[in-house]
Image (tube, rainbow, N blue to C red):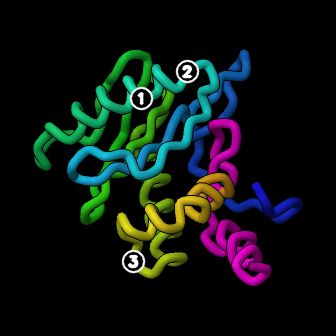
Amino acid sequence: GVSGAQSRAWAPKGLGALRPGGDMTIKFVLLVNKQGQTRLARYTDEHLSIKERRALEGEIVRKCLQRSEGECSFVQHRSYKVIYRRYASLFFLVGVSEEENELATLELIHCLVETLDKYFGNVCELDLMYHLDKAHYIIDEMILNGCVLDTNKANILAPVQLLDKTS
């Protein structure tokens, strides 16, 4: 992240902890509109090529958007567990390792939404389209190498707001 040596807050237990062998647990974060168009994609799994990422996104987005609101928000896809949640016109999808805690991942998604809301003032698709760099900075302050780094909104937004002051 941009923040340097800032103090880090509590992260949900079990989410993003390094496993023996150094496996990252958060593999990707996708923000997708209701039509299935990816508005933001952040991958921590460097083994996937751009072509593989596009194919994976298409498969996962189709699978999640086809589900009814009454169905569970957890989907198994390939070697990933995908946890998703819809907020207004945006779907937030997070792919994690199979052993990860689904509820902790839902908490991370909610924290991300709250942080984006605090920065953008009720985040919407246009905010992401016109300020994609800021959304990436916010995610980078929350997640590092597939691990949750910080969930404190003030800590996450401080470096982004400093960037705003300098520009």
Q: Upstream in the sequence, badge 3 or badge 2?
A: 2
- Please name the residue that numbered disc 2 is placed on: 48
Please tell me which of labels 1 and 3 falls first in the chain. Answer: 1
Q: Which residue is mark 3?
A: 122
**Quadrant occupied by the C terminus:** bottom right
| Residue at 63% from the left image edge and 55% from the top image edge | 142
- Farthest right residue in view: 5
Q: Secondary structure at mark 3?
A: loop
Q: Nearer the viewer, mark 1 or mark 3?
A: 1
Q: Is residue 161 magenta?
A: yes
- Residue 121 versus residue 79: which sits nearer the camera? 121
| Residue 121 percent location from the top left of the image | 45, 81
Task: Locate residue 29, reporting x and y percent.
Answer: 48, 43
Discs 1/2, front: 1
Q: Check the image and report above or below for 132 versus 123.
A: above
Q: Which residue is mark 1?
A: 54
Among the two numbered marks 1 and 2 on one chain, the one whose residue lies closer to the N terminus: 2
- SS state under label 2: loop
